[in-house]
Image (spheres, rainbow, N blue to C red):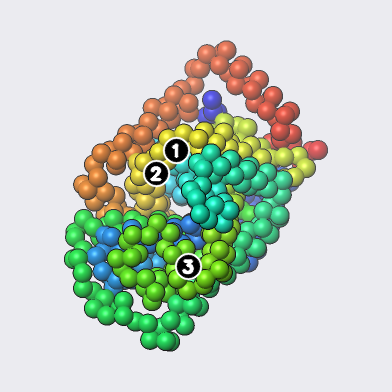
Amino acid sequence: MTRKPVVATIPNGGYLQGTVKGGLPSPGGKEPPGQDTVRLKKKITLLRGISIIIGTIIGSGIFISPKGVLQNTGSVGMSLIVWTACGVLSLFGAMSYAELGTSIKKSGGHYTYILEVFGPLPAFVRVWVELLIIRPASTAVISLAFGHYFLEPFFIHCEIPKLAIQLITAVGLTAVMVLNSMSVSWSARIQIFLTFCKLIAILIIIVPGVMQLIKGQTQHFKDAFSGRDASIMGLPLAFYYGMYAYAGWFYLNFVTEEVENPEKNIPLAIGISMAIVTIGYVLMNVAYFTTISAEELLLSNAVAVTFAERLLGNFSLAVPICVALTCFGSMNGGVFAVSRLFYVASREGHLPEILSMIHVRKHTPLPAVIVLYPLTMVMLFSGDLYSLLNFLSFARWFFIGLAVAGLIYLRYKRPDMHRPFKVPLFIPALFSFTCFFMVALSLYSDPFSTGIGFILTLTGVPAYYLFIIWDKKPKWFRRLSGRITRTLQIILEVVPEEDCHKL
């Protein structure tokens, strides 16, 4: 299935610093003399980087269901504190990733940093669960939200047929895959446009909310901390909901090698994006409570729509369209970034070789973009996606916490490593502790779902030894793998990078 990774022994270096087929420059940014390889182009400017982060973070969640935070905090005041705290924690995680991204100048995000610090086995397990379950299920969920809100203005007085949602969702997902397969530039341009749409959607909520505050509509903020007391188990769940809404700040690190001047643009893009998102999220929640009581919010399945119907009249029909565009932007940003994770994992020998090839004319990682398409389509028309996400949510935060803990390890193990951007040590320490604390509490509060997720994650261990470590695979298996790779190369018109250069 996969080829064995190439590992080079470099003094005081890491696993990723070896040279592999189709490899990109080492973290130092220099190539051996005489090498002239073609690589994915550096087309991610500061503005495009900001659009990737904001466009991927702001999904359907903030418009549809802030009630998850309110349910588990028990009061308006505590819910606003949790939203703010989740923004600050996400900023801490993003700043830690900014240091990692400017120190280890390789695409791949979590996978790359875990591979560099902790070695191939945990890195393979991370990409294994991402490829098989986390990413297809996440993409399917956000795609279904796109289909639902795209159709809502056409079914005002009746329920939207499930099949109609699935079909529109399939069309939207196909469009995203085609866009990312054809052009990096156009994908980035569309993402910028969709990011501005998202910011307009946020302003549609915030501006009327501010006007309500000016008019003195503050009755729902009186005794803001009265109500049901937050339980010890409720607060971690509230943080799960909040952190999920902010998730996406790490996606720029998936495309580090395509960022112009990464030492400057990665920290800037992350800082600007997180400030905009955190302020926007908190103000949106304040706006909701100027018009909707806590009890009404808990009864609403789409709080932004409820808010718009109260204040905007006929203009409220624009809100579902804005939410649909928001979901499309999250789909586009997620596919763009995660395809680079699979590209890097293949380049390092952890996924089939075909995924590290690029299109001979478009210079896009075409196989890595479309690999999720069949699995995501199957999940669109199958079972309970939200259960899958619950099973694997602990894995996401465990590995993110592990990657940030690796930053602390590198500070002591490799103190002389070039770090153009450096954060105070308490920031990664607090963030990684929070991630591990949430994971531990989820094991205690929901042992069944978390236990299933743990078992699914552990299947990556035997898979690693079977596909990566085991050298003596049967000849028929190796021949079949070679034929499949060659056939896919012809169909998709993709080649390894050095062959693309020769063309």
* Helix, strand or loop status at disc 1: helix
Which amino acid type is marked by label 2?
Answer: Tyr
Residue picked out by circle 1: 133
Is the residue 333 above or below the residue 454 in the image?
Answer: below
Residue picked out by circle 2: 386
Q: x and y percent of residue 144 in the render?
A: 51, 46
- Residue in the image at 32% along x and 61% along y: 298
Q: x and y percent of residue 339 in the render?
A: 58, 44
Q: Can you tell which of label 2 and label 1 is closer to the viewer?
A: 2
Compute the Cα span from label 2 to label 1: 11 Å
Which amino acid type is marked by label 1?
Answer: Ile
Q: x and y percent of residue 294 in the render?
A: 31, 68
* Helix, strand or loop status at disc 2: helix
Q: Is residue 138 left or right of residue 194?
A: left
Check residue 309 in the rendering and tell me which mark sits there, or answer none. Answer: 3
Would you call the spot at circle 1 few (<14 residues within 10 Å), some (14-19), or many (20 or more)?
A: many
Residue contact at pointers 3 and 1, CB within 8 angstroms: no
